[in-house]
Structure formats: C-alpha cells, structure tokens
Image: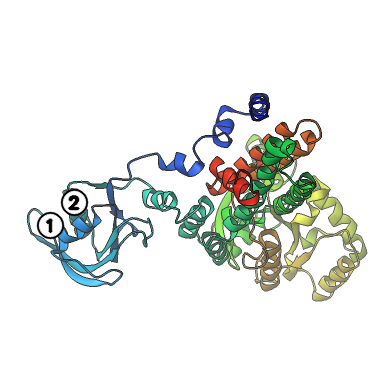
Amino acid sequence: MHFFSSWRRSAAVIKVSLTHSKHDWFVFGRSLSVRRLLCSVGSEDDTIFALSSGQGRCGVAVVRVSGPASAHAVRSLTRGFPAARTASLRSITHPQTKELLDRGLVLWFPGPGSFTGEDSAEFHIHGGPAVISGVLQALGSLPGLRPAEVGEFTRRAFCAGKLDLTEVEGLADLIHAETEAQRRQALRQMAGDLGRIYQDWSVRLKRCLAHVEAFIDFSEDELIEDGVLNDVDAAVRQLQTDMENHLSDQRRGERLRSGVHVVIAGSTNAGKSSLLNMLTQRPAAIVSATAGTTRDVVEVPLDIGGYPVLLSDTAGLRDTTDSVEQEGVRRARQRVEQADLSLVVVDLTQLPSEPQLVPVFLCGHLKNILEQSSHRQECILILNKSDLISAEHNRSIQASLEQSADVPPACFLSCQTRDGLEDLLTLLQNRLKTLCGDPLIGSPSLTQTRHRTHLQKSVEALHQYHQYKDVDLVLAAEGLRLGLSSLGRITGRVGPEEILDTIFKDFCIGK
C-alpha cells in the first residue's frame, strides 16, 4: 500500500512539474524552505557593522554592529561594557592607536532579544563625516568584523525569524514613506497585519493538504474518518473566496505605495499648465497665451491630503501638422490611458452660450479627450476661467450639470484668482481616498506586485485541486502543494516538514 502510494505520488509529481518551471518545483518540492534558501547567502559567523542613520552631516549618527564579535567590539572601543539596553556615555577610542575618536552613547543588545536576533551594539556618535569615518575604520581594524552588505541587518532579522518577508517589505516602505498615508500603511504591514492574513491562509491550506495526504496513504486501512475530503473541499472553496476577495482590491495598496498617477488633460489654452503651477505652488510649467506651448509631459510629485501623487501636465489635445506637437499629443493620450485619475480642464468661455446645451457638449468633449467612456468615472471635470463669465451664468451652468447624470463631478475654478481651489482640493482628496483607501480601516491591502502574482498562482493551483479531485487525488494534492508554496513565497515561511507536523497532530496514526 505504501509503496503503491509513493509510486503514484512520484508519477504525479513528474506530470505536474512538466507544467511548471524548475524553480517552482524546487521550492514546493521536498527541499529547502524559502527562509533557508535566502539565509544560505553569506556567513552568519561574521560580525557586521555599518552606519545605520542617514548620510551627510547631522547632530547624531548611529553605527550598528551585529554578530558574535559585537561584545569584543564594544570592549575594544570603549574599554568597558554597558548594561543591556541601557544608554551609557563612553569615550570611544581606536583599539590600536588608542586615539580618542569621540564621546557618545553606547547601547548593548544581547541576542536573541535584538533586531537581528544576534548580539548587537549601537554607537550613537556625533554626525560629522570625520567622526563617522574614524569609528568605522576602528571597527574595520578588529578581526572578524566586516562592513555590512546592503540590507544585511534586515536579512539577518528575517533569517532569525524576527520578521517575515512582508514585514521586511513594510520596514523598507516605512523608511521610504513620504506621506502620512504611506506611513500608516507601512507601519501596519511592518506590524505583521498583512503577514498574519497570509500565514492564516497557509495554516488552513496546510491542514487541507495534510488531510488529503493522510487520506491517500491511510484510507484503505480505515484509519481516516468519513467525510474528511468533503471538509477539505469546503475549506478549499472558502480559501479561494477569501483570496479572490483580497485580490479584488482595485490595487489600492499598490497605488498608495507607489503614488497615484494624476494627469492634467484638455484642449490647448484651457489652463492646464496654470493649474499645475497653482497646485505645485511654483512655476513648474511655462504658461503662455500661445497655443501648444507644452510639448512634453511635465511631472511633479505632490502630497495631497497625505496621499502621494505624481501630477503630470500634458500637451493640449488637438489636430496639428507640427511633427513635434504631434508627438506631444501622442504622449499626452498615452499618459491619459495609463492614468489613475484624469483632471480634464475645460475653458468655460468655449462652452455653448445656452446652459442646457452644456452637458451634451461636455460629454462629447470628454469622449474625445479620454477616448474611452469607461474612463469617465476616473476623471474630475475642471471648468476653468470662471472669472471671465458672470456669476449668474456660472450658476446656470452648474444647475444644468447637476441635472445630468452623464457628466462626472465638475469643479468651477479660476487659476487667475484661485477661486474654487479649496473645492477642487476637497474633491481631489476624496477621490484619492477612494482610489487608495484608508490604510487604517478594514483588512490590509496588497502592497506589492509580488504578492499579487503569488496569490494569483495560489488561486490557480486551488483550481487544479478541484479539477483533479474526482480524477486523481494525488494530482489534486499537488495542486494544494503548489498553492501552499505560492503563499509561502510571500512570507518566506513554508517547508514540507510543516505538512508532516500537521498530519501527526490531526491524526492518531502509528501511535
């Protein structure tokens, strides 16, 4: 029985592996886990050091040391040893020349209660380049110490099980966060909220796989209860639903992490460059009464209400015989197609004189600018130059637009007087919040394309389980194994030994 099951499983593995890359099979097969693969790079016996604070002159710089020789490094440079996790003011000297390098705070973090899980130390010194260079040279003169590679402290923390891959990515995002919303999302991911979701799915999927494996190997011995496979079917379907719901997030987390692409589009001389300058509060683009001044895309990063925005001004969209302007129009249309949100600027003085005709005119204009009516929901209509028409006419146009369901939200604005700017910023901020979501509310969103790719592969693998469960249970089990492998690639925590642990925990087999 056991020989036959092993032969069937081997045959299934050969069959399934033909449809996947060598790398895919290496990970989900009975080999090293993701964590062990990543941690096999470099030597954990080395003690590493590096400047952990920013480059350049500053009041205080932090030099971090991690590894088995950290205690020796502290004793060599300070002629003493501080209490654990207590800042001690010490003289820092060169171990060979005995020259005083600086006076600063020294902190000692014995492993495993440190960031890296190893013995670690920090030297908080003055941030002058000469001081930093002197301390780094002193550490480099000690035997067994070497400069850290890029990201090596965090990699050691991952290898020690202090962080999973999603938490590592959250830490990197926190370091690079430029807006409040980015900071909130990165903090939540670094705290493990996203990793716990994936880990919960992994635990559920491991249980399903363990039950299927046990059914394959022991069902003929009548050691498995009836209904086990029915429970697995229900659990797998629920997992699929949870994953698909997670994937259908409109890329909010990825958009918040990388920034929302907002494009200013419209006809020539509608006021697009003036709008860009007003939003950036500086002359980022040339403004001229001559039509077609803007030829190329002008990009400016902004923080609007805590949300990161990459704002682009584009060439006016019109038919032209000028080859340079034609290229500018082509680039403008390409950027509109790629945008998350379009700000379509319209010159109020070019609208029909009869207010009731304005909605029809704007619908046709938007169709020409956006080219695809599906983009209507991803645009804000800005009616510029409101200072050039009467207040009564403005109100008539506004009333006409409010009665039309075909025109997107519109904002009356004067780039000359700045009237309507607050309304535009409020409308824009609300739209950004819709596009990015609130990182503090609800389940955490996907933040990396890598996560989305592996989750999609996991969902596809679960489909394979349903495809083969009534035909060949071994092939169905390999579908579960593929799904578990894809989840493990996200967090870096998966290994075949965990499947065996679940089998022996859930079934009293061979006791």
Q: Is residue 440 above or below residue 480?
A: below
Residue toward you, 176 or 79: 79
Secondary structure of the residue carrying tag 2 is helix
Q: Is residue 479 above or below residue 247?
A: above
Amino acid bearing label 2: Gln
Mark-to-mark CA distance, 1 and 2: 9 Å
Outermost residue to the left: 97
**Image position, residue 327 (x, y; %):** 65, 37
Give the residue drawn at x 13%, y 64%: 79
Q: Is residue 159 visible?
A: yes
Q: Which mark is residue 137?
A: 2
Residue toward you, 482 or 216: 216
Residue toward you, 298 or 49: 49
Q: Which mark is residue 94?
A: 1
Q: Is residue 295 visible?
A: no
**Image position, residue 38 (x, y; %):** 45, 41
Q: Which of the two discs, 1 and 2, labels the residue nearer the N terminus?
A: 1
Do the numbered discs 1 and 2 sit on residues whose CB atoms are within 8 Å?
Answer: yes
Q: Quadrant of residue 381?
A: bottom right
Q: Quadrant of the N terminus?
A: top right
Secondary structure of the residue carrying tag 1 is loop
Q: Residues within 10 Å of mark 2 (few under 14, many from 20)?
A: few
Amino acid bearing label 1: His
Q: Residues within 10 Å of mark 1 (few under 14, many from 20)?
A: many
Residue toward you, 376 or 500: 500
Give the residue drawn at x 58%, y 67%: 306
Give the residue drawn at x 22%, y 53%: 136
